Amino acid sequence: MKSRTEPAEREPDISVREPDTSARPPLVRELLLVVGLFLVYKLGRQLANGHTGEAFRNAHHVWDAERTLRLPGEGAVQDVLLGSDTLVHIANTYYATVHFPATVLFLVWLYLRRPRHYVWSRRVLAALTAAALVLHLTFPLAPPRMLHAAGLVDTGQVYGPSVYGAAPQTDTMANQFAAMPSLHFGWALMIAVGLIVATSSRWRWLWLLHPLITLLVVVGTANHYWLDAIAVTALLGIALAVIKLPDPARSRVVRRHAPAHQLAAPGVRR
């Protein structure tokens, strides 16, 4: 009687991918880093304060440059806001309350759900803010609400709420002569870009409404010129070109054994 030897059956592996969290940096380190960067930025803006005469001279140059370039007047947006006390109050509130919380929520969500995109976005925001700080130091600029030639209303002071003191020269909480570039718009635009890149929903392009609304708000409240938004867009474009999104790390794999009844190949006698 011939014996039949069956080949040893190899146990198949079923690979299950788990979400990769290796790209997520330590939380405490990130908190210290972000807070440190914010404090350096605030200190830098304060160092740029006090150049009143230069800030107003630059404001006239920017205003004249916009007219030469035939950019639409900021007053056209403000006229729409001033048509309704409620609308102008909403715009002032948006300017005062959305900027920082939206950016913080954006970074927190990416840290928790898209660690790789978080690191990239934090680097881009840091580079953009550093470049803006250099401009604040070298090109102090009075906003259009202070420029008599613009004929615009300081909606924050007239209608409220306002985040700035009534006397810009003695405002110790903020540097009001740091209009160029507009980080309100730059950060809002990066939030939209970051969420569009990090998500796959067909509705993700609606995030562009945030920078669009922010642009209309900062111009309509006379806190920024059109050129402030154009300048920060150019800086963001450079940052995005230089700081590339890192390649995804390999996901960790958990191997499980298949149930015994799945191990037998078809047609093999037992």
Image: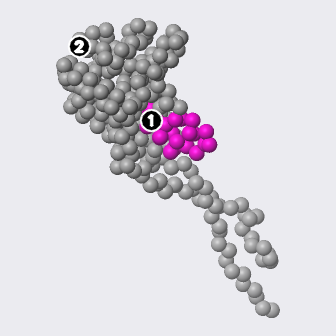
Residue 36 shows up from this direction: no
User: Could you say where residue 212 lies in the image, as x and y percent from the top left?
Assistant: 49, 30
Image quarter in which the N terminus is found:
bottom right
Which residue, given by chain and number where applicable, does mark 1 sit on?
189
Residue annotated with mark 2: 169
Work out whether 33 lies above or below 177: below
* Residue 145 on image: x %, y %: 35, 16
Residue drawn at x 51%, y 9% is 85
Residue 160 higher or lower than 70, as above or below: above
Could you classify mark 2 by the number of other residues whose Cα lies within 10 Å: few (under 14), some (14-19), or many (20 or more)?
A: some
162 and 34: which is toward the camera: 162
Amino acid tagged 2 = Gln
Residue 219: x %, y % from top left: 41, 23
Residue segment shown in magenta:
187-208
Is 207 a magenta residue?
Answer: yes
- Seen in the image, is 241 located left or right of residue 93? left
Furthest residue to the bottom?
A: 1
Graded by Cα atoms within 10 Å as few (under 14), some (14 to 19) or many (20 or more), the crowding at tag 1 reads: many
- Residue in view at x 21 percent, y 31 percent: 138
- Asked if one can make out residue 121 in the rendered structure from this viewpoint, the answer is yes
Looking at the image, residue 37 lies above or below residue 248: above
- The quadrant holding residue 263 is bottom right
Q: Disc 2 or 1, which lies upstream in sequence?
A: 2
Amino acid type at image mark 1: Leu
